[in-house]
Image (spheres, rainbow, N blue to C red):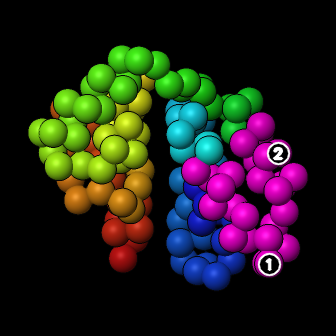
Amino acid sequence: MIYVHDPRDTNKQGIAASLVANLTDGVLLWQVACEYLAASRKLESLGYDKSQAYQYIRDLQQVWYTALPTWNVIDRAEELMKRFSLSHWDSMIIAACLEANVQTLYTEDFGYEVIDGLNIVNPFKLHS
């Protein structure tokens, strides 16, 4: 999501903006929203301020379902971490997707294509 507002890589920005605009049935994970808000601080020097970042999250909440963390996500994340040698935070994202019945996770961060039925797609590799 951060690439939508990061003009330093116009190719990634265009792909990300198109993906977000076309995902009318998307799911906004709590953790991803928090990571976006933290990462957006790096864009302040480029003119993208905190209030814009918070408004963007509010705008997404109007269109996408928001998945909040549960204890089941933590338990499932622990199991995924062991099975796939994932980091804690990566396993939390995957567990939250599985808990929310997400079919496809768009990210450039994972080296897997499918985990427990969750399709993991790097949108930037689709367009390279």
Query: Quick check: is 36 in the magenta stretch?
Result: yes
Q: Where is residue 64, by image quadrant?
A: top right
The residue positioned farthest toward the left in the image shown:
83
Q: Which amino acid does label 2 sit on?
A: Gln
Residue ID for mark 1: 45
Tell me what residue is drawn at x 54 percent, y 44 percent. Answer: 32
Point out the image quarter for the N terminus: bottom right
Rounded to the nearest angstrom, the CA distance separating label 1 from label 2 is 18 Å
Is tag 1's residue or tag 2's residue first in the polypeptide sequence? 1
Of tags 1 and 2, the one toward the viewer is 1
Mark sitting on residue 65: none
Residue ID for mark 2: 55
- Range shown magenta: 35-59
Q: In this view, does 42 lie above or below 65?
A: below
Query: Is residue 40 left or right of 86 when viewed as pictured?
Result: right
Q: Which amino acid does label 1 sit on?
A: Ser
Query: Is residue 55 left or right of 5 when viewed as pictured?
Result: right
